[in-house]
Image (spheres, coloured by chain):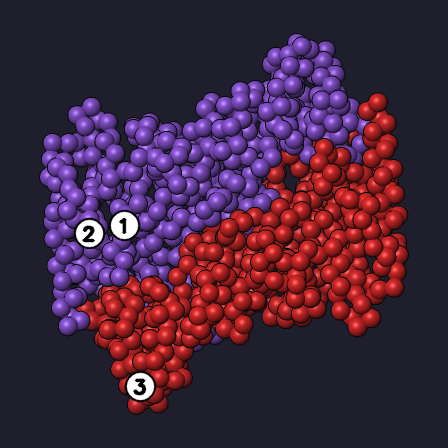
Chain colours: A purple, B red
Amino acid sequence: MEKFSAIYTDLYQLSMAQVYFEKGHQDHDAVFDYFFRKLPFEGGYAVFAGMEDLLGIISNLRFSEEDLEYLKEQGFKEAFLEYLKNFKFNGTIYSSREGDVVFPTRPVLQVEANIIEAQIIETILLNLLNFQTLIATKASRIRLVAGDAKLLDFGLRRAQATGGYYASRAAMVGGFNGTSNVIAGKEFGIPVSGTMAHSFIQSYDDELEAFRDFAEGRPKNCVLLVDTYDTLKSGVPNAIKVAKEMEARGDKLLAIRLDSGDLSYFAKNSRKMLDDAGLEYVKIAASNQLDENVIKSLLEQQAPIDVFGVGTNLVTGDPDGALDGVYKLSWSNGKPRIKISESIVKVTLPHKKQVFRIKDKNNRCIGADAVGLRDQNHIGEMFHPFEPYKSMKIDDYEQEPLLKKVMENGKVLIEKRSLAEISEYSLSRLSELPIEYKRFNNPHIYKIGISTQLREEREKLIQSHKNSLK
Amino acid sequence: MEKFSAIYTDLYQLSMAQVYFEKGHQDHDAVFDYFFRKLPFEGGYAVFAGMEDLLGIISNLRFSEEDLEYLKEQGFKEAFLEYLKNFKFNGTIYSSREGDVVFPTRPVLQVEANIIEAQIIETILLNLLNFQTLIATKASRIRLVAGDAKLLDFGLRRAQATGGYYASRAAMVGGFNGTSNVIAGKEFGIPVSGTMAHSFIQSYDDELEAFRDFAEGRPKNCVLLVDTYDTLKSGVPNAIKVAKEMEARGDKLLAIRLDSGDLSYFAKNSRKMLDDAGLEYVKIAASNQLDENVIKSLLEQQAPIDVFGVGTNLVTGDPDGALDGVYKLSWSNGKPRIKISESIVKVTLPHKKQVFRIKDKNNRCIGADAVGLRDQNHIGEMFHPFEPYKSMKIDDYEQEPLLKKVMENGKVLIEKRSLAEISEYSLSRLSELPIEYKRFNNPHIYKIGISTQLREEREKLIQSHKNSLK
């Protein structure tokens, strides 16, 4: 949809970059960790999304002449602007696979680059990964309760402006089947889908006539919206009439859509009316302020709904609105770095790191990821990152390294998968996760541990900062 | 930032449009009302935003060759695609002024066009107006509690992807003073602002050295982040040292920024340390999960904070996520149209309409808007739209018509104002609103009424639909 510019960033990235440049720090190496602290929706996992798309965006980030002109007006200096003219991200990125289930505290992705390049991409990286991970996680929760029902994203009109474009993509990663959003369909190869609006029917003097015209125009793909005037007295009877007329022409009505009222009540009564008319094949689609809770309840009531159109609550990630993902410096200028905080859970993990998923001999995830130094390839014991007296021996378990090099010196290393492939991968990873972590309410808490070496390295840095304050 | 394509829409708009085209309805006239049903944030008003920008976008919407190719693959037919090749919005739009305070039920904007053009722009109109009105309203609430403090949008990293771009614009409409978002700054002419990140300090072995380098690089515009290691033991003392060094060079430290811990406690203690060092001029900025409630509380505690940086909660419109704005057909093919619903509050208002703000002789808004037919220029009595036994005589009041023609036959009629002008207008309109409607909690409910004529017209349409169901 759009070409991103390198000024899709926060001003302070450029302010800091100019100081780095003037002080000769532009070639200092830096490692930043992308991670989040809290799972959204009080759920037991998150679905990592946005990464593969982001790599392409990052590798194409440049400052245009117009951008540089603007920055000059903002007071940036000539020599630095000259440097930005040749800006290109030349760094290396290690990342979890897009679609994998991810958890708080542990790095989801690591950026290794000179400090200026690493800072400039921070904002766009957070912006796109935080949002898509939020929405893919929401979509995955909806998929888990919806079973085999078809799930469609109808959210564009209530989306947070152009954010809706990425919401449609992320919904697919989390297990949706299609979208009403035409531009996202085109750009991301998402199946597009749609029915009709009330306005279509209102624009006719008569509902039946509107249905007839619509059915004639869409013989193979007709969904009739039945609640404009009166669902059971007018909409469904008229839809049945038109379905019979379609049958006479050798066509089949695909579905009716319910968009108001008690969806369980109307679905059951509509189903009966359709079945009594010999229209067992006509499906029922439902929409109207749906989310995972409403869908779960509808299916528990055995509402015969085959297709759910989910809008606002999906694309805005209601009620959370944002994933709290951050990007923290863990290494620079040849040394591990740490951020101290009064709150222990905000003290960062220094160093270049690797993350392992801990599995039993049958390759079943035991519900734990362990973080070690990057050159460790097996962890004997893992410690709670904030309560170090809690530990667990994991020496005998299988340990799957999760961070893979996906970009090197600015070049994308992985082959781009289709959204369908990413979604399938996500479902397979989700299926490896024990059911307790997928429970809808109060899920089991997935364990995150750090290795002895990482714990000791962190402890050393904390002590040295304490000493410097004396 | 981007050029919008006409496929920035829901698929069903195009499906319906094809049927209209094939049935020869493409020249049927249609009027759609844009309105919302519920005020966000349990507030007493909303700030209308996005409209002036939207007009430019709508007037430039086209289908590219590539778009048409894509639609062909989706099964759209040649003759219709040929029609879309020449698509251009040629309609007329009546609208409230951007920045005005607006209320539920009454039309905020009316689109009058042939039915195909009116449908195709529906999605982008809802997408951009719903979101920007939500965020401008949130920003306005924050402005109301923040008094004269400077308010900066820091939200891009947690924004809903590219939605952050429009959030920065809307924040200005609602009364913010600037943004960290460089691309929004450039495109919308918003003052950009920013400080430094923890990573800058962490990348040095020593906080003081980091502060010194930053201050040297930004002699006129230096804000130092003081909470990386220990706010009162390290950050503020180092900032004071650097401020004194700046003074010796003839420069002045602009501010310090607090980003963690108890902001009231740290602001008071930092203020005292700065003042004791003779640095009364150094301001204090605060950030970290702020919203109108936190800012209100901080100011009630008399925390000496001069600048608030607001991120996530502003740009995602937390906790509401979306404004429930809709676009409903009120006229087509020469006749008024209505949507019936089991829920009376969802029955729409038919006809081409005008909205009046009711004012006393001193030009003070009395807390009511009345909706009449478009050719009415004064309303004698207004009726509650859903409880018709409630009415109010307004004959003796001033009545300000609110919907002005802003686009005619696809041509923008109004001169584009700067965001600063829109924001100023918004504040002036807000000042005309009695204080009860601006109360933070449980505000007074603004009255919306409909004229006798509109009530009778609606009643007729409801009756005729009732009769058709018999």
Label 2 crowd (10 A; few <14 / some 14-19 / many >=20):
many
Say which amino acid is labelled 3. Answer: Ala
Mark 2 secondary-structure assignment: loop
Mark 1 secondary-structure assignment: strand
Tell me the number on the disc at residue A110: 1
Classify residue B214 as left or right of residue B462. Answer: left
The residue labelled by disc 2 is A352
Label 3 crowd (10 A; few <14 / some 14-19 / many >=20):
some
Subunit of mark 3?
B
Q: Is residue A246 visible?
A: no
Classify residue B137 as left or right of residue B164. Answer: right
Viewer-side residue, A12 vs B78: A12
Label 1 crowd (10 A; few <14 / some 14-19 / many >=20):
many
- Residue drawn at x 51%, y 28% as measured from the top left: A297
The reply to whether callout 1 and callout 2 are in contact (CB within 8 Å) is yes
What is the tally of numbered marks visible in this picture? 3
Subunit of mark 2?
A
- Residue drawn at x 72%, y 58% as measured from the top left: B96
Task: From this view, report whether residue A280 is shown above or below residue A75.
Answer: above
Q: Tell me how far mark 3 sits from mark 2, CA to CA.
A: 41 Å
Say which amino acid is labelled 1. Answer: Gln
Say which amino acid is labelled 2. Answer: Lys
Q: Mark 1 vs mark 2: same chain?
A: yes
Q: Is residue A330 visible?
A: yes
Q: Position of residue A379 (x, y in %)?
A: 13, 40
Viewer-side residue, A133 vs A5: A133
- Residue drawn at x 20%, y 34% as measured from the top left: A358
Q: Position of residue B226 (x, y in %)?
A: 30, 71
Tell me the number on the disc at residue B277: 3
